[in-house]
Image (spheres, rainbow, N blue to C red):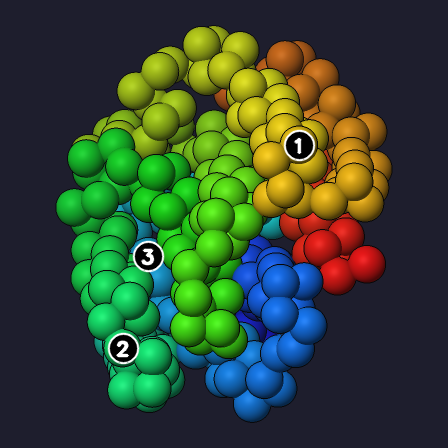
Amino acid sequence: MLSSWLRAIRIRFLLASVIAVSNGLAIAYWKFGYIDPLYAVLTYLGVGFLHASVDLLNDYWDHKRGIDSATTRTKFSGGTGVLPENILTPKAVYTAGMIFLILGAAIGAYFVAIRGVAIAVILGFAVVAIYFYSTSIVNAGLGELFVAIKGAMIVLGTFYVQTAAIDMAAIFVGAIVGLLSATVLFINSFPDYEADRSKGRRTLVIIMGRKIAASAFPVFIIAAYAMIVAGIFFGFTKAYSLVSLASLPFAVKAIMALRKDQESAERLVPAMSCTVTYSRITGFLLAASLIF
């Protein structure tokens, strides 16, 4: 049963939130030379709960709309399969999603009490957006934008919890981290193109069309690298941050794989796998570089 729930919350993809929190903590340590261990642990937990919530509720709504039954599931796309395969019940998944949402909001409420209105704004956005992500937000074609904003807010919120201050470095690095997450969502929506379109979803790939989206994919990657480099000159990242470019081989492989095929779920797996690896390596090395 535990393995079923770990599958349902997509435990591997929680790394995106771990990376975002880690970058916020790294900037706080860089700027102030200290982080509060208790606040750090609570932030990891709270953000992890909220991330698990959005994944569970996404699975629930995709099942209700028949999307996950129409997709070809891979390790990176097509949902977790726990509902179409009757491993868990829709009611259990929805209930768990709401419980994680409440737990994440409760930790957020604690930080609102000690840090004030800035955290309240971030928390309010997170709770509302998580609940409506799989319906209104995705239907409006704003899924990738939401994920990018979410990543940026996690970095900024983590920094603010630690320091009670707002710094342009946190905003700038947050934008990079958000872009990395949006890039993963973008490429993972290629295999679900037909199923999503038939059920009323509007991902960025659907709006642009597969061919144009494949041509635009490198822009996401170039933009992230360019921001890391530009940040050095503005003082928002460090010269050490160039180590993040170690992920370049995976980025190139992802671009080349996507150029070869934009339709076959099986043939898209290498592109999705390399994109996830590129995103994780870039994010973790960026965080590490900020505390050197």
- Where residue 216 appears, x then y in whole percent? 50, 15
- Where residue 29 appears, x then y in whole percent? 66, 69
* Image disc number at residue 58: 3
- Whether residue 134 sits left or right of residue 19 in the image: it is left
Would residue 261 be visible to someone looking at this image?
A: yes
Q: Secondary structure at mark 2?
A: loop
- Whether residue 128 sits left or right of residue 196 in the image: it is left
* Image disc number at residue 116: 2
Give how far apart the Cα atoms at labels 2 and 3 are: 30 Å
Give how far apart the Cα atoms at labels 1 and 3 are: 40 Å
Would residue 63 be visible to someone looking at this image?
A: no
Q: Secondary structure at mark 3?
A: helix
Q: From the viewer's perspective, is residue 59 above or below residue 102?
A: above
Q: Residue at x 72, y 55 (%)?
A: 290
Question: Label 3 is placed on what type of residue?
Answer: Asn
Question: Label 1 is placed on what type of residue?
Answer: Phe
Which tag is nearer the camera, tag 2 or tag 3?
2
Decide which of 85, 242 is in the foreground and name it.
242
Decide which of 284, 234 is in the foreground and name it.
234
Total marks in image: 3
Q: Which is more N-terminal, label 3 or label 1? A: 3
Q: From the viewer's perspective, is residue 243 above or below residue 6?
A: above
Give how far apart the Cα atoms at labels 1 and 2 are: 32 Å
Q: Write down the residue under mark 1.
A: 233
* Image disc number at residue 148: none
- Where residue 178 appears, x then y in whole percent? 48, 45
- Where residue 27 appears, x then y in whole percent? 61, 60
Q: Residue at x 35, y 62 (%)?
A: 54
Classify mark 2: residues with Cα within 10 Å, few (<14), some (14-19) or many (20+). Answer: some
